[in-house]
Image (cartoon, rainbow, N blue to C red):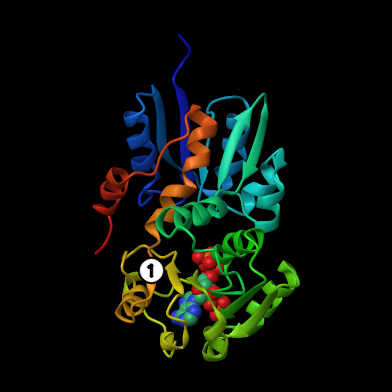
Amino acid sequence: MSAPVKAFVIGHPIAHSRSPLIHGTWLETYGIAGSYEAIDVAPGALPDFIVALRAGAFAGGNVTIPHKETVFALCDEVDPLARRIGAVNTLVSRQGKVRGTNTDYLGFLGNLDQEAPGWDGARELAIVLGAGGAARAILVALAERGFSRIAILNRTADKARALADEMGPQFSGHALSGFADLAPRASLLVNTSSIGMHGSRFEDLPLDALPDTALVTDIVYTPLQTPLLAEARARKLRTVDGLGMLLHQAVPGFEAWFGTRPEVTAQLRERIEATLEH
Ligand code: ATR
């Protein structure tokens, strides 16, 4: 019998990560004799960790803060999507090579496809709040899905404009105050900024300017019901919370390391939800 397959999540700190519970649940569900462990790797120790990974100590794993950008240069190959996003969150070690990819992109799409089928039917305009690292995977995903205009709104408008210039011709950058003018044509509003975490809220974001058919989604999942989602629901707009993106981004990694494509089920969601701030 071959040795159990081993995978990891590395970060610093790492204690808060829900990934061991997600992958542990799938290992149990599918009866796979593998392991998935959280390992605290300080920035200085990352190169040595990658050497061990290349030598076959693990099948691969996830990478989180603060390593998502620095791990890039340590990979033998980085796929084009992760290159465009500018961050690697998943590693696969095969035949002495470490390959980096970014699964946040698929996590975002997988969540909306499952929770709000048809969400991408109208693709005239999507509004994305925030211009940081987390925005990038979502911007690439929306462009790939064929949105003809993607407006990036950010507290620091210059950052939004610089990111829009980098991403391509269908992107534009604006201050948050641009929301009221853009909203009437938007079919999708996505928050990628850290606003909403632990209850913080956007000031002056007039959601009533959105069409009744618009979908509002947040990538923040602590708490699950952010003030933005609560307000959208109060206005009878469709909403999707951020937990599904966390679950769906884990799918491609699990499949690559353990050879089974796992499903994001209601039971998995409940199990992870029970560990979140309410
Ligand atoms: P991440 O990698 O998680 O995206 P980040 O790169 O620090 O983190 O980006 C955080 C995002 O949240 C940025 O768009 C930031 O806006 P600025 O570019 O103006 O800093 C946004 N953000 C954080 N705190 C905010 C606040 N109090 N009001 C509005 N936007 C905020």
- Which corner quadrant of the image does residue 149 belong to? bottom right
Q: Secondary structure at mark 1?
A: strand
Q: Amino acid at mark 1?
A: Thr
Give 240 or 69, whichever is nearer the viewer. 240
Residue ID at (65%, 63%): 146
Is residue 208 among what the camera can see? yes
Residue with the mark numbered 1: 239
Please identify the quadrant where the N terminus is shown.
top left
| Horizontal side, residue 40 vs residue 77: left or right | left
Instruction: Using residue 81 as the reference point, say whether residue 182 is left or right of it.
Output: left
Q: Position of residue 204 (x, y in %)?
A: 43, 91
Residue 13 visible in the snapshot: no
Q: Is residue 142 above or below residue 55?
A: below
Q: On screen, 167 above or below 31?
A: below
Q: Is mark 1 within 8 Å of ligand 1?
A: no
Q: Is residue 107 left or right of residue 274?
A: right
Residue drawn at point x = 24 percent, y = 64 percent: 278
Residue at image coords 52%, 55%: 109
Position in image of residue 53 (x %, y %): 58, 31
Residue placed most toward the observer, 180 or 10: 180
Q: Is residue 42 above or below residue 35?
A: below
Q: What residue appears at the point 71 percent right and 37 percent down from the top-left corner?
A: 76
